[in-house]
Amino acid sequence: MMGSDFIAINWGSSNFRAFLLDHTGHVQDAFAEPAGIASLDRDGMAAQIERLLRRWPVASTLYACGMVGSNVGWEEAGYAQCPIGVEDLAANLHPTTIAGRTMHIVPGLACRRAGDGAPDIMRGEEVELFGLMRAGRLPRDGVVALPGTHSKWVRVVEGNVMEFMTAMSGEIFDRLTAAGMLSSIVAAPASVGDAFTAGVLSGVEGALGLGTQLFGVRAQVMRNDLARDDAASYLRGLLIGAEISDARSLYPLGPDNKVTLVGTPVVCALYAEALAVLAIPSVTIDAADATTQGFAALHAATGVMQA
């Protein structure tokens, strides 16, 4: 017999994470392994769910978010349009059949920014955002930044996601320091300090474009204006500074507008320092259970969960 417990799956390109939640949204059990969408064909995806159902046979409902709903996943779930709240997101869940069971895939979010008229998309972060709101750890109004490989800057109004901006700063840094011309000048990890601060200011205030400034990092090292041990710190600061400059052009960021940072402590510390250099206050919050809280909020919004 089916119970009131439900399954929540965060299925990305590289990893599969699943949680068994009870009717109040508390985690009863969890399971994770490196079985991402990129490593499985359709038979493999179905087999993954079959194994999960054998582990938790009484779960009543299945939800999933992440790349499982992309054009390379099990079934494309599309994007729900901003502005949007958790109830509207729940109304846009995409039901599909896998391993003989219905699975409700959370769509991504899409927006067209007011400031520049450009479109943007996210997939997976929406569950985390609404989970943090459910837990009372995000402001109902303000700017939330999720630093990472593809950082998100999200404008929240009255608990709704209004619009957002994505920056590839993390991926650019990883690629530039792993291969190519700039990798040859990097001798130490990036850290907060004078070189990082100089990079932030250059990224924010530089008269030339980012492409020119990036090559300039190599020139500074080769001409002994910048130590090799400081190159990664300066480069990271440059990229983060340019990203914050873009965000500041779109959203109210200043001494009276605190930014909420969500992400790993090490990366958030770099962003907090960069914001402080620009006199923009920030607070970093723990997001360890944000995804499960988000699924609980969606489950409640569908009317399945009882108070």
Image (tube, grey):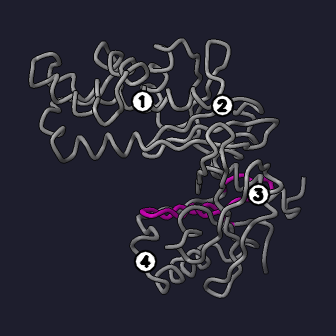
Q: Residue at x 58, y 57 (%)?
A: 123
Residue closer to the observer: 252 or 211:
211
CA distance for labels 4 and 2:
36 Å
Q: Which mark is residue 240?
A: 1
Residue range in magenta is: 7-27
Three-letter amino acid code at disc 2?
Val
Residue closer to the observer: 59 or 157:
157
Chain-order first, disc 1 or disc 3: 3
Three-letter amino acid code at disc 1?
Ile
Q: Which mark is residue 70?
A: none
Q: Quadrant of residue 226?
A: top left
Chain-order first, disc 3 or disc 2: 3
Chain-order first, disc 4 or disc 2: 4
Is the residue marked by circle 1 packed among few (<14), some (14-19), or many (20+) residues within 10 Å? many
Q: Which residue is mark 4?
A: 40
Q: Is residue 299 above or below residue 152?
A: below
Chain-order first, disc 1 or disc 2: 2
Q: Is residue 222 left or right of residue 86?
A: left
Q: Which mark is residue 143?
A: 2
22 part of magenta stretch: yes
Q: Residue at x 35, y 33 (%)?
A: 210
- Label 1 residue SS: helix
Callout in the foreground (4, 1): 1
Q: Which residue is mark 3?
A: 89
CA distance for labels 1 and 2:
16 Å
Q: Is residue 222 above or below residue 279?
A: below
Residue closer to the observer: 121 or 281:
121
On the image, the x and y values in percent for residue 299 come to: 78, 60
